[in-house]
Image (tube, rainbow, N blue to C red):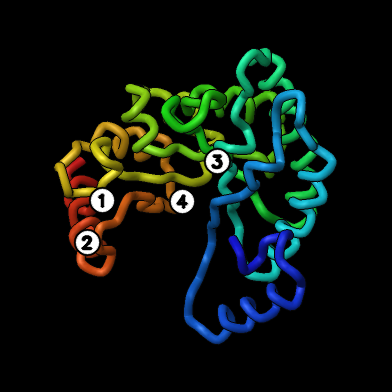
Amino acid sequence: MLFRSPLAEESTFNEKLAILQSSEMIMPALNSFIPGKLRSVGPEAVHDEILKYVETAFRRAQITGVKHIVFGSSGSRKVPEGFSRDEALNQFTELCRKMAPIAEKYDVVVVLEPLNKGECNLLNTVADGGEIVKAVNHNNIMLLADVYHMLRENESPESIIRYGDYIRHTHIAENKERAAPGTYNDDFRPYFRALKEIEYNGLMSIECNWKNMAEQAGPALEALRKQISSI
């Protein structure tokens, strides 16, 4: 996100933009959204600062052709010890409500990414995220289904079906070591069947710990294609 980060000067953004425009690279989706120091929840929540941040982020996203921004940002949304989780959920939901019209202004969709409990203590399942999206009730705040986090949380593919109307992006990796697909031969087919049932036709990012991306990317894609073709 550095090339369009609100923390970077406009001149830096323009330099990165020129490099991007001279290449054939397409970036329809981005993550690493809000820095941990900009707290979304807790007694130190800084919603006004975050909204200023996202104004620049969304404007630069529109310029670069980005359509989906992944709101994982575990550091920003981690609930401090001793703080009410219900209050944190209310804060997070309210932040999303405030963010929605800014996203609409710049024609980007923010997709909430549930993260397993080992990474964050708020919004851990697709069901958690789906309920927040329902509460916000705005077309520019939607949901991401990450199969890796679903596996870590033992979350059923049924959550994909239940909240399928809100899912606009997906991630995938194997449960063990967050490895590239095909490394340990995880069976993703139940999740693919659920995505097929909701007629999902959006993007899927392989968000894994690559050991050697140049060598692993091809076999990872082939492993996914093989499972998808078998359902």
Indicate the amino acid at tag 1: Ala
Residue with the mark numbered 1: 180
* SS of the residue under disc 3: loop
**189 or 212, nearer to the observer:** 212
Q: What number is the disc on residue 202?
A: 4
Q: What number is the disc on residue 216?
A: 2
Residue with the mark numbered 3: 72
Whichever of labels 2 and 4 marks the residue nearer the N terminus, that label is 4
* SS of the residue under disc 4: loop
Residue 122 is situated, as x and y percent measured from the top left of the image, at 56, 25
Decide if residue 156 is on the left or right side of residue 3. Answer: left
Marks 4,3: beta carbons within 8 A:
no
Q: Residues within 10 Å of mark 3 (few under 14, many from 20)?
A: many
Disc 4 and disc 1: Cα gap in Å?
20 Å
Marks 3,2: beta carbons within 8 A:
no
Whichever of labels 3 and 1 marks the residue nearer the N terminus, that label is 3
**Within the image, what quadrant is residue 219 found in?**
bottom left
The nearer-to-camera label among 4 and 3 is 3
Q: Is residue 104 visible?
A: no
Decide if residue 196 is on the left or right side of residue 33. Answer: left
Residue 177 is situated, as x and y percent measured from the top left of the image, at 26, 41
At horizontal 48% and vertical 75% (from top left) the residue drawn is: 25
Disc 3 and disc 1: Cα gap in Å?
20 Å
Decide if residue 220 is on the left or right side of residue 166. Answer: left
Residue 169 is situated, as x and y percent measured from the top left of the image, at 49, 46
The nearer-to-camera label among 4 and 1 is 1
Disc 4 and disc 3: Cα gap in Å?
18 Å
* SS of the residue under disc 2: helix
Residue 203 is situated, as x and y percent measured from the top left of the image, at 44, 53
Indicate the amino acid at tag 2: Gln
Whichever of labels 4 and 3 marks the residue nearer the N terminus, that label is 3
Indicate the amino acid at tag 3: Gly
